Image (cartoon, rainbow, N blue to C red):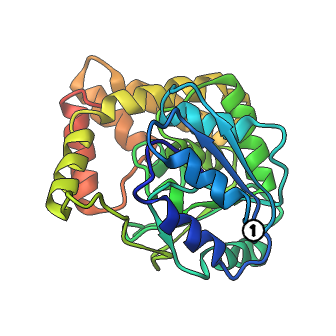
Amino acid sequence: MATRNGAAFLDGQLASIAAQTYPDIDLWVSDDGSSDETVAILNDWAGRWPKGRMRIVQQPGEGRAENFSSLIVSAENQADYYAFADQDGLWEAEKIAVSVRWIEQNAFAVPSVFCTSPQCGCEPDFRNALVQNIAAGNTMLYNRMAHDLLAESCRRTGFHSHDWWLYLIVSGAGGVVHCDPRPMQRERQLEPETGWRTWIARALRRRAGRFAEQADVNLQALVRNRDLLSGEARAICDLYWKVRSDNFIKRLYYLRKSGVYRQTVQGQAGLYLAALLRRL
């Protein structure tokens, strides 16, 4: 779990994790320089955590991505399964148990990720991961093989988004990413003075114009981790690089040849429009 000034939400999230039906949950929290009561709340919970161990570490305010990265690469975090947690979510009681069960029954022997999202119309794949992040990190649970792969990649490079990078590196290395449409958590908690319209408007503003920047960070990170990718994924990356050609006909040609795709017809149309406008 990564936290920063989350005192308004933290009790609800921690209570929902403590109420999981899965019996053993060690909770590792990295706080990114909170100035409210976040750390005090965490310390209170650490003294009565009912599921196992709870440890809190301090980060010097380096941002959300670095906060998650520090947790990922920590050699102390040894487990069979790992799950990302935000500070403002509310998990359904079966969330971890359902996620673990799917991996154990379907994909235990390879790097594996279970996540939930309503937008998964097609099975997750590296060709999709290059151009779309399909699930929020707080829906993701992954096995030890996926964690070791993720940690090794994070020692080599930074990332823009921990959840998108997990999708990229696991699918690119030939692992399994399964997306379930059933929600495993309730609606995100909001600040008392913040309504849904305000929250959605802020989210859209954050997203607008940032895809090209995020995609560039991802591609540079994939270059630094090329040896971790499968031969097929490396070939797809090579084709996708050419989508950034100066010639718009070549951009469209290589986009089609690479086979990259988004999950919906509208998203696919937007992808080709972005290629025309040089926004990939």
Snapshot quadrant of residue 118: bottom left
The residue positioned 43% from the left and 57% from the top of the image is 134
The one of 137 and 274 positioned closer to us in this rendering: 137
Q: Residue 170: give x, y in percent of width and height.
A: 65, 48
Numbered marks: total: 1
User: Can you say whether 22 is above or below 262 in the image?
Assistant: below
Snapshot quadrant of residue 106: bottom right
Q: Residue 226: give x, y in percent of width and height.
A: 67, 28
Kind of residue at badge 1: Ala
Snapshot quadrant of residue 181: bottom left
- The reply to whether residue 164 is in sight is yes
230 relative position to 133: left or right = right
Q: Residue 23: give x, y in percent of width and height.
A: 78, 77
Find disc 1 in the rendering and name its residue: 107
262 relative position to 90: left or right = left
Q: Residue 91: give x, y in percent of width and height.
A: 52, 72
The residue positioned 14% from the left and 60% from the top of the image is 197
